[in-house]
Amino acid sequence: MSSPTVEQDNRRIQRYALALPTRIEVRVDPKYTWNEITRLEDISAFGAAFKLKRPVKRGRLVLISLPMPRQLRCYDYLEPQYRIWGLVRRCIPLGTNPAAQSYAVGIAFIGKNPPPAFLDNPAKLYEIGDREDGGLWQLCEMEDNPDESGLPAYLRRHTRFSIPESLLIELLDENGDVAASEVTVTENISLGGAAVFTSFNVDTGTFLRIKSERHDVSIIGVVRGKRVGQDGIVRLHLEFIDNLFPLAGIE
């Protein structure tokens, strides 16, 4: 199913403006999970919209818990809290004040349990396919380099800029304390990640804190890969977890 068809189908689904308290859990790594309490903007049997203080990448799976009306549920009709997995379809920044930044998030419900592959690789991104007989959306894994020419700008993957941006990266231990740090520069950078030169000998899945003095920002990132360039220098490929990098003045 193409994305425009999905969006048209979504508009035909009746939505209810219910400001229900909702807990959002985002698992970005087998060892790292963050959660936030918010209130719904609206909800249907097949999806929901709400605001978050942190951005969530399109295609990521999230777990939500809420006192959902029984007539909108697909299972667990007698449970006080309805727990259901959803796929992030959009995440749009609201406002221009970085100190009070929030994000409008829309998700499509995919069921009581995530795909088995998600448990091994929570960072995997997905797309939605047809709806199942029960009404919930089916999933397919997102391509590594999908054609996004037909998508609006806010749904596209973040553009990377091949520029040297000075950063301080801090290696975090299991308690979240700084074990080591170094000043480095980026090989490329986007809103949601960067490739940085490093002397750290770290594995995929390692968490780092990335700081920019110029932009006065501190972001938690996770190592998604590393490679050695022809110059013999190691590059770490980082995904930013709890914030976007402020590219104003760079783009």
Image (spheres, rainbow, N blue to C red):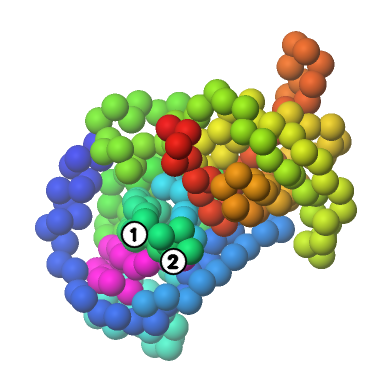
The label shown at residue 10 is none
Q: Is residue 238 left or right of residue 179?
A: left
Q: Which residue is depicted at the point 25% across and 71% down?
A: 42
Which dot marks residue 95?
Answer: 1
Looking at the image, tell me whether mark 1 or mark 2 is earlier in sequence order: 1
Q: Is residue 143 rendered magenta in the image?
A: no
Establish if 243 lies above or below 82.
above
Residue name at image x 60 percent, y 52 percent: 216
Q: Amino acid at mark 1?
A: Gly
Q: Amino acid at mark 2?
A: Ala
Crowd around label 1: few <14 · some 14–19 · many ≥20 (10 Å)? few
Q: Secondary structure at mark 2?
A: helix
Quarter of the image that includes the C terminus: top left
Residue 76 appearing in the image: no
Q: Secondary structure at mark 1?
A: loop
* Boundaries of the magenta span: 40-53
Q: Which residue is mark 2?
A: 100
Residue 70 placed where, x, y %? 30, 83
Residue ranking furthest to the left? 12
- Main secondary structure along the magenta-highlighted residues: strand
User: Is label 1 in contact with label 2 (beta carbons under 8 Å)?
Assistant: yes
**Residue 83 at what x, y percent from top left?**
45, 73
Q: Measure how far apart labels 1 and 2 are at the Cα level.
A: 8 Å
- Packing grade of label 2 (10 A; few <14, some 14-19, many >=20) is few
Q: Is residue 27 visible?
A: yes
- Residue at point 65%, 31% (across, down): 186
Quarter of the picture holding the N terminus: top left
